[in-house]
Amino acid sequence: MDEPKKDVIRETDAEAIRLGKTLLRNARFGALAVIEPQTGSPLASRVGVATDIDGAPLILVSMLSAHTCALLADPRCSLLLGEPGKGDPLAHPRLTLVCQAARLERGSSEHARTERRYLNRNPKAKLYAGLGDFSIFRLEPQRASLNGGFGKAYQLDQSDVLTSGPIVEELATSEQSAIDHMNADHLDAIAVYAKHFTKVSGNGWIIAGFDADGMDLVSGDDVCRVFFPQPLAAARELRHVLVEMARVGRASVDVGTGLNYD
């Protein structure tokens, strides 16, 4: 008798969801797969990536590109995220999102928000973002496939990767002023977030975006994701959470170095 086929998909848990969100929020680029309208064949291309406040991927693409024409003809697409490191590239985690693409109209509030977030994350794109043949597409995830490395496969649904509720619109209203304030007046605290909560090295970290789950930090081409201890329930909680995280991070540094400010 044939042995029953082994299910290689693991049960989705909090650790898998955290990894999936980390790959999504950390992504600077991805492989976009579309359906070529003339032939029905798959077509893949590299695209720059950012995320909307709720976590949906954002791409800025030229209307002259083959993949853009394909999205306009058929919005079904997938996006592969995750950068390989040293050694076997298949040993490193990656996330594939199955999405529906929507082109955002210039002049709309949604376009203004997403363009702001995209350029915060990819400032070099300011050179061409305003050109008439470039458009922002929001890729609405329907589901996702997470491979955390050999033997670590998970299926994620939309609620595992996207944030919903009033917090999304609340943060959209106040996010940029909070970013500007932190980057202008609290670079020392941002350095603490990077060093203590993500263990990254290097200097020059600034905040590129806030969302209910955490914040995205950038330093040149480097990116790191900092999660809040608990997701925000309301935008007004952001200041208190940032102050407390800076306090915790500084206290850890002080203990580690034996410093005492009493």
Image (spheres, grey):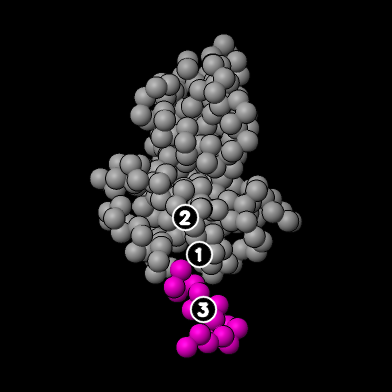
**Badge nearest the viewer, 3 or 2:** 2
Q: Which residue is mark 2?
A: 182
Q: Earlier in the sequence, mark 3 or mark 2?
A: 2
Residue at left 54%, top 81%?
254
Q: Which residue is mark 1?
A: 189
Residue 244 in sight: yes
Q: Residues within 10 Å of mark 3 (few under 14, many from 20)?
A: some
* Secondary structure at numbered mark 2: helix
* Secondary structure at numbered mark 3: helix
User: How far separated are the C-alphas under marks 3 and 2?
Assistant: 21 Å
Q: Position of residue 72 (x, y in %)?
A: 47, 17
Q: What count of labels does the image hold? A: 3
Write down the region rendered in magenta: 246-262
Q: Are marks 1 and 2 in contact (CB under 8 Å)?
A: yes
Q: Position of residue 234 (x, y in %)?
A: 27, 54
Q: Residues within 10 Å of mark 2 (few under 14, many from 20)?
A: some
Q: Which residue is mark 3?
A: 252
User: How far separated are the C-alphas under marks 1 and 2?
Assistant: 8 Å
Q: Position of residue 256 (x, y in %)?
A: 58, 83
85 versus 133 height, above or below: below
Q: Nearer the viewer, residue 165 or 106?
A: 106
User: What amino acid type is highlighted by mark number 1?
Assistant: Ala
Q: Residue furthest top?
A: 38
Q: How would you classify the magenta stretch by its main secondary structure?
A: helix
Say left or right for 14 vs 82: left
Q: Residue furthest left?
A: 166
